Image: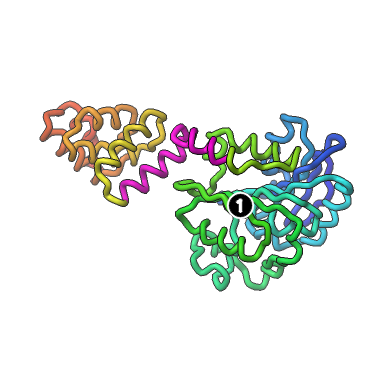
Amino acid sequence: MDWLYKGRTVAVRSAILGPGPCAITFQSARFDGVDPNWIDQQGFAETFFSKRGLNAIHVLPSHNHWYQAETEAVVKAITGATKGRALTTYGSSMGAYASIRFAPAIGAKRVLALSPQFSIDPEKAPFEQRFTRFFRRDKFVADTFDSAAYDDIATYVIYGAFDADAEHARLIAEAVPNSQLLPIRFGGHPIGPILKESGLLTSMTLGLVLKGEFDEREFRSVLRATRRQSANYMRALYQAARTRRYSRRVLAIGRAALEISALNDKLRGDLASRALDAGDLELAKRALSEADLARIDNKTRLRLGAKLQRQGAASLAAAVLKDCELAV
């Protein structure tokens, strides 16, 4: 590993191993506070590229500044090390935003952006509530996309179809020519885990970085065939179904989600309660069998205990209610 640039709030590390194409990755936001040793963090997808002996350069931020700092130095460091190479920028969320914004300046012709933001400026993206605490108007001085600069850049934007990411994607498509939007129903944020579980993340990344190729038809086909084996997808699907009060469908989805251990303890408790309402004691027992009951909130446990007692499952009711009333 060679350092191309070490700044106060951003660093650029090279893992170029030989001739050929190169990925430029931008690390995602982190929510565990500012790490004083941030410069030692792994780059985005660093293990993925290093295990395969592939060329990469990793851009590392000191904190969640949406890459608004030291941009000229970052561009100079990357371009100085990648002359004559085919470049693909790559990132997720904050890193995906940077992968789009930096692509023209560093000469990348392909962008793989997972769950990117168009902006976190409340005036530009008033629907964005998740990241506005990181916005500083006096610091966000490079928060625009020059549409003319993207004419010969293929930008692939993959995102969850039913949340704020969809609105970000729409705005990106308006500002960035040649954007290919690839929404995934119940994809959530970030979209990467579903792609990884389906095997698409590996094939898609390698195809773009090594060959500059992306087959949307194949992408859609594989996603349809594998999405119900994704714990992240099934968890999101169950959460969406229960908010829409599709009782019969919720139970069917919940049953399928249990098959791949997709539900957390809270959702297992929710499924058990719904199953008991439908008179399906066996499904309720199954939902609770591997749950950590202490992680289910007291209100739900009290409700479950009463329902189980009414359906003659006294021993399970006692287990659900154990220590519960004392904690209320």
Question: Of all residues shown, which one is farthest toward the front?
Answer: 217
**Image-based side of 199 in relation to 289, left or right:** right
Residues in magenta? Answer: 219-243
Q: In the rendered structure, does residue 292 fall within the stretch colored magenta?
A: no
Q: Residues within 10 Å of mark 1 (few under 14, many from 20)?
A: many
- Residue 292 lies, in percent from the top left, at 34, 33
Magenta stretch secondary structure, dominant: helix
| Image position, residue 202 (x, y; %) | 64, 35
**For residue 85, side relative to residue 217 (left or right):** right
318 in relation to 28, above or below: above
Is residue 158 visible in the rendered image? The answer is: yes
Give the residue pinned by disc 1.
157
Q: Does residue 220 belong to the magenta stretch?
A: yes
Quadrant of the image containing the N terminus: top right
Q: Secondary structure at mark 1?
A: strand
Q: Looking at the image, which is closer to me, 139 or 287?
A: 287
Q: Residue 75, percent across and down?
A: 81, 57
> Which colour scheme appears in the figure?
rainbow
Res. 294 visible in picture: no
Relative side of 268 to 72, left or right: left
Q: Which residue is nearer to you in this view: 241 or 8?
A: 241
Q: Is residue 55 above or below residue 242?
A: above
> Residue at position x 25%, y 41% from top?
248
Amino acid bearing label 1: Val
